[in-house]
Amino acid sequence: MAIAMEHFAAHGYEGARAEAIAAAAGVSKGAVFGYFGSKAGLFLAAYQSATRTFSRYLDAPASVLDQGFFSTISYWLANTPHMIHEDWIPYRVVLIGSYCSDLALKREITKYMQQEDPYGTREFVEFGVECGEVRRDIEIELIISLVDWLIDRCQDAIVTEELDPGLFGYFTQSAQMREQRVRQFVELLRSAISAPDTSTGSSQ
Amino acid sequence: MAIAMEHFAAHGYEGARAEAIAAAAGVSKGAVFGYFGSKAGLFLAAYQSATRTFSRYLDAPASVLDQGFFSTISYWLANTPHMIHEDWIPYRVVLIGSYCSDLALKREITKYMQQEDPYGTREFVEFGVECGEVRRDIEIELIISLVDWLIDRCQDAIVTEELDPGLFGYFTQSAQMREQRVRQFVELLRSAISAPDTSTGSSQ
DNA sequence: CGGAATTATGACTCCAGGTCAATCAACGGT
DNA sequence: ACCGTTGATTGACCTGGAGTCATAATTCCG
């Protein structure tokens, strides 16, 4: 599976060769198709494997969690470039899964993400609600989806040139600029979903 | 181009056959590859053509625009199922473009969307800023991206079963439920980017 | 140890993207 | 009106990778 991830990461979905993956894994092509059914099935397995290598939101250090929900988001976004750099193979696979052209495969991915919630977005948002930082007047399903959508896209834009609509310029802009944008992004998210009554002073 | 759109919409990116498109258009395969360079190039042209068939935000009826920025968003979201039903071929092509697996192609799409802004998101957000409904304390680039991201995903989830993480259930839930979710979604967006309308306390 | 059941193999088929030498059509100079 | 040049068009051909399947290898029991 790690080998499949490497190949998909290196060559993309179309570019990856089922036979090459089989050979690198020391099995025959027939075995791969027998087990995974198709290239899409192989990719799905690689995708699931990749998502499981990443931390869940609540895996942040206790000192960060203690500072609350939005601080934890800031923590993860601030660490995104570093984490991705450390772990770029699974990240790349997840990226391909997020933007894959085959809608049948995409449906499988959506279903998997919904069922397994490998990053623990649900429990994280519930944590936010419990500690009073996230509003209760909106259905939690919607907030979970919003958090998922925005953080995914923000992370992708931060570290993937192809997906950045000029916001972060990972390769062209200064780190300061990026940090400012991330801060503003979290501010937007906070405005969207924070509980109306916040005793904490909002800006640093 | 309309013919290419039909084929991509009907069979997906992988499933569409360059030769079949050429034949349906009454030209040879060689001509297609000569003109568009590759299947990806052909798709990009179809994608651009598809985006241009859709209305821009500010094309809403004057009576809607008069009610302001967020009312206009509600209007478009409420009409999404109807519009997509009327126009499902270009919609499907755009959808494929949004979730295509080839990152090289995705980059071209991102660049195009950023340069041409075919839905007029920028002018729409500027409109929102001018009529005082959208906050000015966050860089407009970020707000434009946020609006783009969220409305895209919301629309996709509304009308595309494959992409709905259980929120709208276009084929399974009641219309009432969907309307409620859309209303809450707009409420979230409003919280995120609306200007504080009580007293304009300048905060930074 | 032998034979059944299961699994693995890789040569093979099929098919779609991409190429290119040959052909055709348009144009303009004489 | 003719012909040569130039550029566009064609479709047979090539390439290579997904997916198949008859055969071989291995395992599993009695």
Image (cartoon, coloured by chain):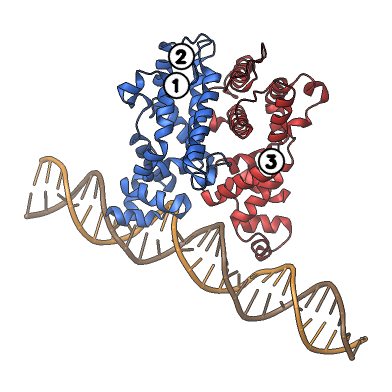
Chain colours: A blue, B red, C brown, D orange
Crowd rating for badge 2 (residues with CA inside 10 Å; few <14, some 14–19, many 20+): many
Report if the CB atoms under discs 1 and 2 are less than 8 Å apart: yes
The chain that hosts pointer 3 is B
Labels 1 and 3 positioned on one and the same chain: no
Labels 1 and 2 positioned on one and the same chain: yes
The chain that hosts pointer 2 is A
Asked which quadrant contains residue A114, the reply is: top left
- Residue A95: percent from left, percent from top: 46, 41
Residue topped by disc 2:
A133
Residue topped by disc 1:
A70
Which one is in front in this view, the residue at disc 1 or the one at disc 3?
1
Disc 3 residue type (three-letter): Asp
Crowd rating for badge 3 (residues with CA inside 10 Å; few <14, some 14–19, many 20+): some
Label 1 to label 3: alpha-carbon separation: 31 Å
Residue B10, relative to residue B153: is it above or below?
below
Label 1 to label 2: alpha-carbon separation: 8 Å
Q: Which mark is residue B117?
A: 3
Nearest to the observer: residue A4 or residue A174:
A174
Disc 2 residue type (three-letter): Glu
The reply, left or right, for residue A35 in relation to residue B184 is left
